[in-house]
Amino acid sequence: MQYLYLCAMCLGMMIIFIYQEKAKNYIAAVMLKGMASAVFVALGILGSKMSRDQNFAKYVVIGLILGCVADVLLNLRFVFEKKGKIVFLVGILVFLSGHVMYLLALIPKCANLTVCLIAGAVLTVLTLIWIFRQITAAAAFKIFGVFYIGAIMMMTCVAIGILVGDPSLHNVLFAVGAVSFLISDIVLILNTFGSESKFSLRVVNLSLYYVGQLLIALSLQLI
């Protein structure tokens, strides 16, 4: 039951944070976003104590912590507008590190790793071709985007590959969480660098993101 309370707390703070951001109360928004993200970190730490695979849990918890740090950095770009681009890129770099941690957790569990990585590489290329046709962004952002989308696509493909080989509840939660995270990031990129930024897409982006992180954190108590 405590896990449900934590999930509800996280999503509740997310909703308040979104509307604070819409109202341009950026400092309050950063604080609320950091608190919401700290909840999925706490959920992951609690779940890791129940995990039978401590190596897997270690990498996932580190990934959750990096996600929390990146969340704060991404929103600090609104607080420090003059350094917004640099702060955003650092946030993306921290998120990228988090995806690498998730991938390191998953790799030892994947029986068909080569197939999953090839599928991830092909889907990365196709996704990036489509994304770059939809957005206008500086070269630095596009370079970061290649590595970022590549990392999360690889992670998602490996998670799905593990689920296909072993359809357990743990693997379902992680794979669904990874897919939610991936879609969330694609929506974020389109909404940030597309022709028009929409509040509705911001809501979709953040909702999928927090659901994804919560599912990944919850999966730890089932392994």
Image (cartoon, rainbow, N blue to C red):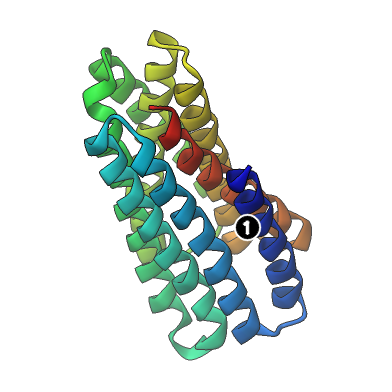
- The quadrant in which residue 9 appears is bottom right
Residue 81 versus residue 174: which sits nearer the camera?
174
Could one spot residue 3 in this view of the protein? yes
The x and y percentages for residue 39 are 53, 59
Q: Which quadrant is the C terminus positioned in? A: top left
Q: Which quadrant is the N terminus positioned in? A: top right
SS at circle 1 = helix
Q: Identify the residue shown where x is 43% and y is 86%.
A: 83
Q: Identify the residue shown where x is 76% and y is 71%.
A: 19
Q: Identify the residue shown where x is 29% and y is 25%.
A: 117
Dot 1, how many residues are within 10 Å of its Cα: few (below 14), some (14-19), or many (20+)?
A: many
Q: Identify the residue shown where x is 25% and y is 19%.
A: 113
Residue 107 versus residue 62: which sits nearer the camera?
62
**Is residue 110 depicted above or below 29 in this figure?**
above
Left or right side of 55 for 24: right
- The quadrant in which residue 171 appears is top left
The x and y percentages for residue 181 are 52, 43
The x and y percentages for residue 180 are 57, 39
Left or right side of 7 for 126: left
Residue at the outermost top position = 165
Mark 1 belongs to which amino acid? Cys
- The quadrant in which residue 189 appears is bottom right
The x and y percentages for residue 221 are 44, 34
Count of numbered badges drawn on the protein: 1
* Residue to which mark 1 is pinned: 10
Could one spot residue 187 in this view of the protein? no
